[in-house]
Image (tube, rainbow, N blue to C red):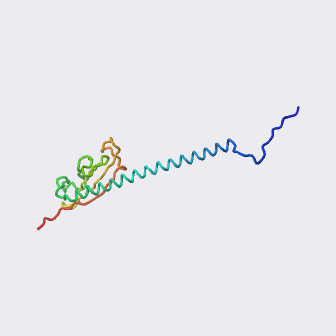
Amino acid sequence: MKAERREHRPADRRGFSLIEVLLALVVVAFGLFVALDLMAANQDHARRALHRTVATDLARAKMAEIQAAGFEAFEDLLPAAADAPTSPSFFPAAPVRFEPPYRREEYFWQARFDRLAGTADAANVELRVYWLPAGIPAHTAPTENSLAIGGLLVRREAAP
């Protein structure tokens, strides 16, 4: 009995082995996964940038309204001069939606007033704008979904 010999393919054979095909599929799948993950991250960054841009515009507009109204319009909300270092005032008491002409459903605002120490005629104002997905109450807003700007209110001299 003679042992049967298998014939070997010639060295110039055509085609790929199963291992080579599977390895190529793994490499392509990994590349697609990385590309899709980068696209998702890019969309998330673009969404956050849009929220910050809109929040900045809304905060500047609301701060301009507060400063145009003047110190006297908010004087009743300010803490007494003796309480200045420890007790800021908030207006409104809880964050509220922007009203027309700034109507944006997912954005809320709240201002914090602190009387400056040593003077009864000036106050720091911090205006915070929050943004949330629809249906979530404003008081649950995480601080990473907010933007704050500061301003100064000073009592105006009466015109002669």
Up/down of 119 relative to 105, above or below: below
Q: How many marks?
A: 0
Point out the image quarter for the N terminus: top right
* Outermost left residue: 160
Which one is in front, 125 or 105?
A: 105
Q: Tell me what residue is drawn at x 59 percent, y 47 percent.
A: 28
In the drawing, does residue 128 fall left or right of residue 25?
left
* Outermost top residue: 1
Residue 91, how many percent across, how many down?
23, 50
Residue 63, how many percent across, how many down?
26, 57
Q: Tell me what residue is drawn at x 24 percent, y 58 percent.
A: 64
Residue 137, how many percent across, how many down?
31, 42
In the drawing, does residue 7 fall left or right of residue 28?
right
Point out the image quarter for the C terminus: bottom left
Residue 7, how many percent across, how many down?
81, 40
Up/down of 136 relative to 58, above or below: above
Which one is in front, 58 or 101?
A: 101
* Outermost front residue: 14
Q: Tell me what residue is drawn at x 65 percent, y 43 percent.
A: 21
Which one is in front, 92 or 136?
A: 136
